[in-house]
Image (cartoon, coloured by chain):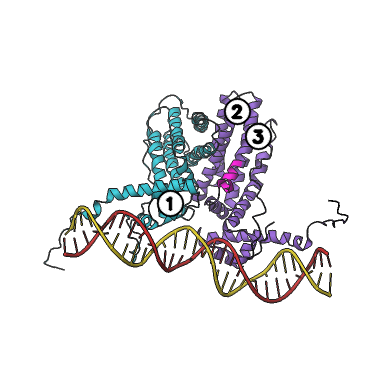
Chain colours: A purple, B cyan, C red, D yellow
Amino acid sequence: MGRSGREPEPRGPDGRRERWRAHREARRAEFVEATVRAVARHGPDVGMDEIAAEAGVSKPVLYRHFTDKADLYVAVGRRATELLMSRVVPALTGCGTPYEWIRRSVDAYLGTIDDYPDLYRFVVRRSFADRPVSEDPVAEDKTMIAAQLAALLGDHLRAFGVDSGGAEPWAHAIVGMVHSAGDWWLERRSMSRQSLTDYLTRLIWHALDGALRESGITIDPHQPLGTVGELRPVRVIPARGSGRGGDRAGGPHRLAE
Amino acid sequence: MGRSGREPEPRGPDGRRERWRAHREARRAEFVEATVRAVARHGPDVGMDEIAAEAGVSKPVLYRHFTDKADLYVAVGRRATELLMSRVVPALTGCGTPYEWIRRSVDAYLGTIDDYPDLYRFVVRRSFADRPVSEDPVAEDKTMIAAQLAALLGDHLRAFGVDSGGAEPWAHAIVGMVHSAGDWWLERRSMSRQSLTDYLTRLIWHALDGALRESGITIDPHQPLGTVGELRPVRVIPARGSGRGGDRAGGPHRLAE
DNA sequence: TCACCATGCTACCTCAAGTAACAGTTACCT
DNA sequence: AGGTAACTGTTACTTGAGGTAGCATGGTGA
């Protein structure tokens, strides 16, 4: 209340901490990769000691970077989501004919699980069972993709002045088609990825075409779509508070951002 | 090698044990229900102490009936599978027009998850993450249903002398449609079950109709199908050995069948 | 009569997840 | 120049949930 002294201005982030930022991120990424390797080697019952050994560190080092086992697994799930979205989103938002669009998107999904089968299997195993559903990356990925698809479908249906109520369940159904057939294919491998992409593209096209025709909308599968609705980026993952509570009296100092 | 003595003939199961068979099964069923209630009350991190308390017994009593926690959870999964199959299989194998058939099957599935949301959520949470995939009831249920659908599709395609390679991926895709949209609906409840069934039935019909038309097959959605292929019962769950290894020196005596 | 199965309990064991505490180095802040 | 923050690594330890040992009694079948 009227202190005559001037507080010194804060000068920005402490450089003693900032110089380690990139290093910390790189370390976290290493541990995520090591986790996937350790799971592939030891099975889903892998312990933190085994993960630490795979990463070439001791257990407390691992706990410097992750709050607990679940936190580590969530990071793995986020990695998988990044990989998947980096491919599927451009495919979903790109131009082209409807048929190309479907095909490209299906192939982006299948290509990802084909390139990272171990990571995918780990995430699908849902070692997140002890977490609320909001932390389930598989469900989140599906919801994100379905939301984009629902927006697109909904916009088209509304633009033609017909019932758009089916957009959301249809979007989820279509995402479930690719997901389920992809799981089957990953375990069975009874056909090439190309063949599966063909079969799925056709089925999806027929499903959508039929549903739209029923509403009086006819679309040529080989003519580019009009820009009825620009796909809006949809963000579903809730921001995670960086603070996890007060500092503990001891133990490994936490390197959380 | 020529022993003159005659071994006494075994006279069948020991009645001291047999008299408890039905009782044991009923007890197991009670513990399965208690598990679902306990998970709903305490969350997915529920402990065996909490499950035992919910069942009104002490922990060692629970271990008299189940080998370990995973065994208990597998039993819960099997219960869910029974419930689902008791409804979906008659729907899939019954007569009727294609449209009715699809609709009836979709409704059987959605009706089950609607009537047993807690049980379904528990199973979907896949607390079986520490088990091989073959013990994953969700994957097994989907595989079973998809196998029946694939057989039906495949038979139709082969009867018309066209490429039947898509039968299996399409079957899995369609099961994934219902599964995925069902999950969405169970959490969102943004429409009635009737509406969802309508939307899904239409989409599935269009998908199948389109795929078959492409192969030169036209089917009337409102005329009964010919009996091209009788649905064969498909058994996927591997028989589980009743012996779990040698008897332990002590501990609660195991009541396994 | 002996064996099997049921009932229940307390006390205990095991081990994987997670923590406390120690020591040293580098680079930034005051 | 001294203090501080962040990094490196380790051993030893704690905790608690899953699972077990062992006790006693009664009813029924072999």
The single residue placed furthest to the left in the displayed view is: B4
Secondary structure of the residue carrying numbered label 1: helix
Q: Residue at x 59, y 45 (%)?
A: A140
N-term-proximal mark, 3 vs 2: 3
* Residue range highlighted in magenta: A132-143
Q: Residues within 10 Å of mark 2 (few under 14, many from 20)?
A: some
- Image spot of residue D26 (x, y percent): 23, 56
Q: Residue at x 47, y 48 (%)?
A: B39
Q: Residue at x 76, y 60 (%)?
A: A18
For disc 2, the marked residue is: A164
Q: Relative to B99, is A62 on the left or the right?
A: right
**Which of the numbered marks, if any, corresponds to residue B221?**
none
Q: Are marks 3 and 1 in contact (CB under 8 Å)?
A: no
Residue toward you, A209 or A129? A129
Q: Are marks 1 and 2 in contact (CB under 8 Å)?
A: no
Instruction: Determine the image quadrant of residue A204.
Output: top right
Which chain hosts label 3?
A
- Image spot of residue D8 (x, y percent): 67, 69
Secondary structure of the residue carrying numbered label 2: loop
Give the amino acid at mark 2: Ser
A231 inside magenta stretch = no
Which mark is in front, 3 or 1?
1
Magenta stretch, overall SS? helix
Q: CA distance from mark 1 to mark 2?
A: 45 Å
Q: Residues within 10 Å of mark 3 (few under 14, many from 20)?
A: some
Q: CA distance from mark 3 to mark 2?
A: 22 Å
Give the amino acid at mark 3: Thr
Q: Relative to A154, is D20 on the left or the right?
A: left
For disc 3, the marked residue is: A97
For disc 1, the marked residue is: B51
